[in-house]
Amino acid sequence: MHIGRNISRLRSFRGIKQLDVAKRLKMTQQNYSLIENAEEVDDNLLSRIAAIIDFPVEMIKDLDNSKVQSIFNSGSITDSIFYQNNPVDKIIELYERLLKEKDETITILQKDKK
């Protein structure tokens, strides 16, 4: 597993430039580039990068290169990334959370009405 390459792919998927990540990490773009070329990345640094590119550390570590397709079309990037996690479960989880928040909001509004 090449952690640096996984970081690079996920960063590109988000449309974030190396320079932007480097600035947030308070380092030069050249030093950050070395991280993306490294097979292993320190867990603390990986956590900071994961927060910046908004992907869980586990996803960065477990990204399976055989399940990643990168298609470059006329200067724009279209990435299809298939995760080992079931996306339907994530959608259901989000939907249930939104329903709960809606119910809580209705309850608060009904109390305020009385």
Image (tube, rainbow, N blue to C red):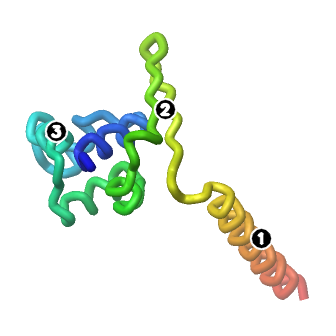
Q: What residue is shown with label 1?
A: 99
State the residue at coordinates (17%, 47%): 39
Which residue type does callout 1 highlight? Leu
Q: Is residue 10 above or below residue 42?
A: above
Q: Residue furthest top?
A: 74
Q: Which mark is residue 65?
A: none
Which residue type does callout 2 highlight? Asp
CA separation, marks 1 and 3?
Answer: 43 Å
11 sits to left or right of 77:
left
Q: Is residue 78 above or below residue 35?
A: above
State the residue at coordinates (32%, 44%): 6
Indicate the secondary structure of the residue bearing disc 2: strand
Indicate the secondary structure of the residue bearing disc 3: loop
17 and 79: which is toward the camera = 79
4 and 111: which is toward the camera = 4
Quarter of the image for residue 13 reads top left
Query: Between disc 2 and disc 3, whose residue precedes?
Result: 3
Indicate the secondary structure of the residue bearing disc 1: helix
State the residue at coordinates (74%, 76%): 100
CA separation, marks 2 and 3?
Answer: 20 Å
Q: Is residue 44 above or below residue 108?
A: above
